Amino acid sequence: DEQHLIEGFHQFAGKIKDGSVLFLELGVGMNTPGIIKYPFWIMTGNNKSAKYVCINAENSAVPQDIKDSSICITGDIGKILSELM
């Protein structure tokens, strides 16, 4: 259920709060930003060793305070991943 997922996410976040971590967001956009996007932004901002990467068809932007720790790519995920490989 949703509450179980939220609790699991918070447990995971507590374990990696000070370590090196890459938050990779693929295709989330602004459909449900409170589940993935916003928590990733917050955890990136709270961890100097964290990086945030997003690939989305639209809305590939980040708050100014994590801009230097982020890479955002706007475009078709399939095409972008094919080009990277």
Image: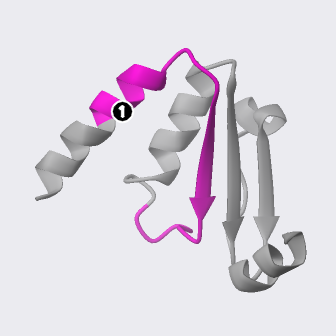
Percent across and percent down for residue 26 are 60, 66
Image quarter of the C terminus: bottom right
Which residue is painted at 56% across and 68% down in the image?
Answer: 29
Indicate left or right for 41 with 36 as reference. Answer: right
Q: How many marks?
A: 1
Percent across and percent down for residue 65 are 72, 30
**Does the magenta-highlighted stretch encompass residue 15?**
yes
Residue 49 vertical position relative to residue 10 in the rendered view, above or below: above
Residue 82 vertical position relative to residue 44 in the rendered view, above or below: below
Percent across and percent down for residue 48 are 69, 18
Which residue is painted at 89% across and 77% down in the image?
Answer: 83
**Does the magenta-highlighted stretch encompass residue 74?**
no
Indicate left or right for 70 with 54 as reference. Answer: right
Looking at the image, which residue sits at the far right? 83
* Element class at badge 1: helix
What are the residue bounds of the magenta stretch?
10-32
Q: Quadrant of residue 72?
A: bottom right
Which residue is painted at 30% across and 32% down in the image?
Answer: 10
Which residue matches tag 1?
12
Indicate left or right for 1 with 81 as reference. Answer: left
Which residue is painted at 78% across and 71% down in the image?
Answer: 74
